[in-house]
Amino acid sequence: MRIIIRFLEEIGSYVLLLKKTFVKPQNIRVFWEHYFRELDDIGLKTTGLISFISFFIGGVVVIQTALNLDNPLIDPSLIGFAAKQSVVLEFAPTLSSVILSGIVGSYIASTIGTMRITEQIDALDVMGVNSANFLILPKILAAVTFYPFLILLSMFLGVFGGWVAGLVTGLVSTPDYIEGIRIGFDPFHFEYSIIKTIVFAFLIATIPSFFGYYVKGGALEVGRASTKAVIWTSVMIVFWNYIITQIMLS
């Protein structure tokens, strides 16, 4: 019973923090400066890792699919089709977001948590600055606006990596792979993935911010808050992935 009450209290605190966050910035110029800084910190700096992982994930999908479809009666173009569907629908938006929850989530939670224990957030509040709006809103906006483009890049590199793997290993020819990509092409699948990505980006920015904002204690507690932030962000990404898939694809 205590666990349930504690959980409900945490949800209430999270909602109240969001309410405090989503107000008009007090200084628009400073807000945009922070926004572009966050674009670099939680956006551009993650591009290299996501690109690297996406490329090789696409290659692995093609190799595993080809090795499991070795029946000569099966059309080889299905390898390209399977790679496209896997990368676009699941691997690019969901796997990339889980990876980002670890990289970006720990960074956000530790950064805000350090500001809390060093009383920098208290100083902002004393000066009349809305600390939640000042610190969290630029992160949310940066994640929500940048991550869809990052996931589109991840989709392209995943499919491209699959083509390279098929070409190098000789498991699928270029015409068959391209034909597979064209089979059953549905633009709605991209809309579905982008919508998922926006929801995941919101979670990646807000949940770690919540844990960092309300951390108490010292450096040890900041580390624990960062771990909790990564765990809960990953859990909520998986949970909302199921909910959105059930709503949009069922």
Image (tube, rainbow, N blue to C red):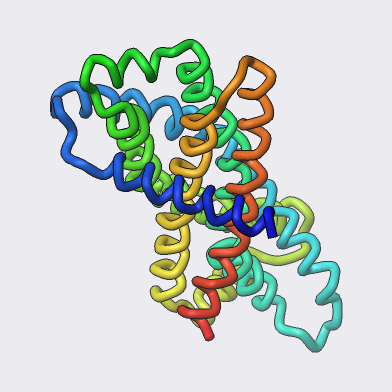
Q: Is residue 91 visible?
A: no
- The residue nearer to you, when weighing 236 against 56, is 236
Q: Which residue occupies 21% across, 42% down?
A: 23
Q: Which residue occupies 58% across, 42% down?
A: 101
In the drawing, does residue 245 fall left or right of residue 66?
Answer: left
User: What is the total number of numbered labels drawn onto the structure image?
Assistant: 0
The quarter of the picture where the N terminus appears is bottom right
- The residue nearer to you, when weighing 107 against 134, is 134
Q: Which residue occupies 46% across, 79% down?
A: 248
Residue 168, relative to residue 214: is it above or below?
below
Horizontal and vertical percent for residue 126? Answer: 28, 16
Q: Which residue occupies 65% across, 76% down?
A: 77
Horizontal and vertical percent for residue 157? Answer: 55, 49
Horizontal and vertical percent for residue 171? Answer: 77, 63
Q: Is residue 35 visible?
A: yes
Residue sticking out furthest to the front: 1
- Quadrant of the rendered structure where residue 86 is? bottom right
Residue 84, relative to residue 234: is it above or below?
below
- Quadrant of the rendered structure where residue 71 is? bottom right
Residue 182, relative to residue 27: is it above or below?
below
- The residue nearer to you, when weighing 77 against 46, is 46
In the drawing, does residue 199 fall left or right of residue 26?
Answer: right
